[in-house]
Amino acid sequence: MGYFILGYYLSNTKRYCFNNRKFAICLIVIGTLITFMGTLYLTSLSNSLDLKFLTLGDLTPGAAIQAAGIFILIKNTDFREIYGKYSEIINNHIILFSKLSYGMYLSNVLLINLCSKIGIFSLNIPPFINVPIMVIMLIVILSVMLLVMNKIPIIKKATGLNNNLNKG
């Protein structure tokens, strides 16, 4: 719930720093340093590798600061300038993905648990290969699932999608 409130606050509060990409990059660096230094500190206290700052994920101060920085950075990036003539196609995909993201957020744990029970996540593949494959697989499956669910009138409201996907 806190990240929804943070996103709303960062979107609707008129402050110079929330429109500054350098400030966003500073937040990302500070959040990363907090995670890194916290891990080093806890590891030195226990004399063994302590990954609480990583296993707690988005519940740590470092992760919240990083999330704010990434939000501000993306909010203040002109993708039309970066992608030139492809900007409309990319923009449409970004809008669709952003509309799907809420439903993905609500349903990804169910799919991850299902995949774990089936044994898909227990493959003996190195994490630097396995994690990107699983993320892509989850995004594709959840996107298709949500788009299909959005066509069913009774279930449509549970997807988190607007009634009209073509509107921005």
Image: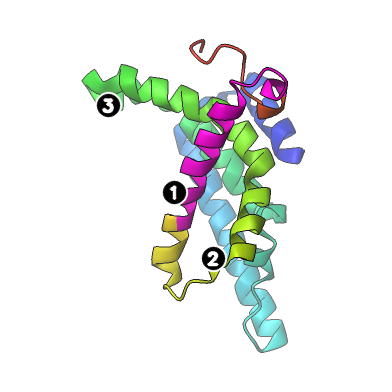
Q: Where is mark 2, residue-wise?
A: 121
Viewer-proximal residue among 136 and 114: 114
* Range shown magenta: 134-157
Q: Residue at x 62, y 50 (%)?
A: 111
Q: Residue furthest left?
A: 85
For badge 3, the amino acid type reads: Tyr
Q: Where is mark 1, residue-wise?
A: 136
- Residue 83 numbered mark, or none: 3
Q: CA distance from mark 2 to mark 3?
A: 35 Å
The secondary structure making up most of the magenta span is: helix
Residue 84 position by quadrant: top left
Q: In what element is the residue under mark 1?
A: helix
Q: Nearer the viewer, mark 2 or mark 3?
A: 2
Is residue 149 in view? yes
Q: Earlier in the sequence, mark 2 or mark 3?
A: 3
Q: Earlier in the sequence, mark 3 or mark 1?
A: 3
Pointer 3 local density, CA inside 10 Å: few below 14, some 14–19, many at least 20: few
- Residue 67 numbered mark, or none: none
Q: Residue at x 39, y 21 (%)?
A: 91
> Left of 14 or right of it: where is 133?
left
Pointer 1 local density, CA inside 10 Å: few below 14, some 14–19, many at least 20: few
> Left of 44 or right of it: where is 5?
right
Picture coordinates of residue 65 (x, y %)?
63, 47
**Quarter of the figure with the N terminus:** top right
Q: CA distance from mark 3 to mark 1?
A: 22 Å
> Left of 80 or right of it: where is 24?
right
Q: Earlier in the sequence, mark 2 or mark 1?
A: 2
Q: In what element is the residue under mark 2?
A: helix
Q: Tell me: residue 32, above or below residue 76.
A: below
**How many numbered circles does the render carry?**
3
Residue 115 position by quadrant: bottom right
